Image: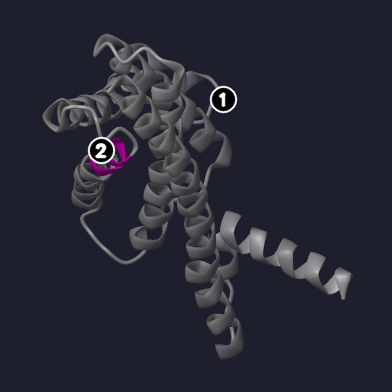
Amino acid sequence: MIKKIILLTILLLSCILFPEISLANDISTVDAIFLVVVFFGVPLIILIVFVVLGIFFLRKIRKKNKEDSQRKL
Amino acid sequence: MYNINVGGYLISFFLTVLIEFTVAFIFKYRNKRFFLTILLINLITQPSLNILLWVIWHFVHPQYLIRIFFEIAVVFIEWGLLIYAWPQENKKRLFLLSLIMNLASFAIPYIIFNTFIFRFLYRFLPIRRIYF
């Protein structure tokens, strides 16, 4: 199971980093669906992770700023 | 094709953050918390921009129009995030800051890496060109 996950991760990363290699060859429908999922799914997940983490810490900063402004008042 | 160049992205990310820090410093936002806000905002916008550009690059032309459209969108998104994190600050001033930060981070690397000296270096030395 772990080996499969590692292999899949390597495959995913290789498809992200070298998409032209994957698309240069003739691919079957299943591979094409897989590639579409990789092309849109993985970037979307990375995007969501960055956005969620960023907003989480920005909320903390907002709270601190509000506390500071209330203290000043 | 719009290639994923992780090293190039890291350099462009840190250069962008450095330029935006400098602009914020000029605007007299000189505390650690504000710099952290800028860093976090860039952590949200830069990967999003690059990933969206990478995905859309394959389907939409002309490419410079997409880039300009997303850069304008980034100005407004960063403005919104700055207002969210610093609600007590002047909104117009934050918009001006966001606009100038993004203009500077877009223009300065472009000017630097497209000067004659760098074109000469790209031609004769085995270094990779960095796109911002």
Magenta region's main secondary structure? Answer: helix
Structure colour scheme: one colour
Mark 2 element type: helix
Instruction: State which tag comes first along the sequence, 1 or 2.
Output: 2
B104 or B122: nearer the viewer: B104
Chain of the residue displaying label 2: B
Q: Is residue A23 above or below residue B74?
A: below
Q: Residue extending furthest left?
A: B92
Residue matched to label 1: B126
Residue A28's spot in the image, x, y percent? Answer: 59, 87
**Which residue is found at the position 29% from the left and 20% from the top?**
B108
Q: How would you rate the neighbour count of disc 1 (Cα within 10 Å): few for under 14, some for 14-19, many for 20 or more?
A: few
**Label 1 to label 2, Cα distance in Å?**
44 Å
Regarding residue B100, the answer to whether it shows in the image is yes
B94 or B69: nearer the viewer: B94
Q: Residue extending furthest bottom?
A: A29
Magenta region, residue range: B79-84
Residue B122's spot in the image, x, y percent? Answer: 45, 23
Regarding residue B12, the answer to whether it shows in the image is no
Q: Is residue B84 above or below residue B99?
A: below
Q: Amino acid at mark 2?
A: Ile
Chain of the residue displaying label 1: B
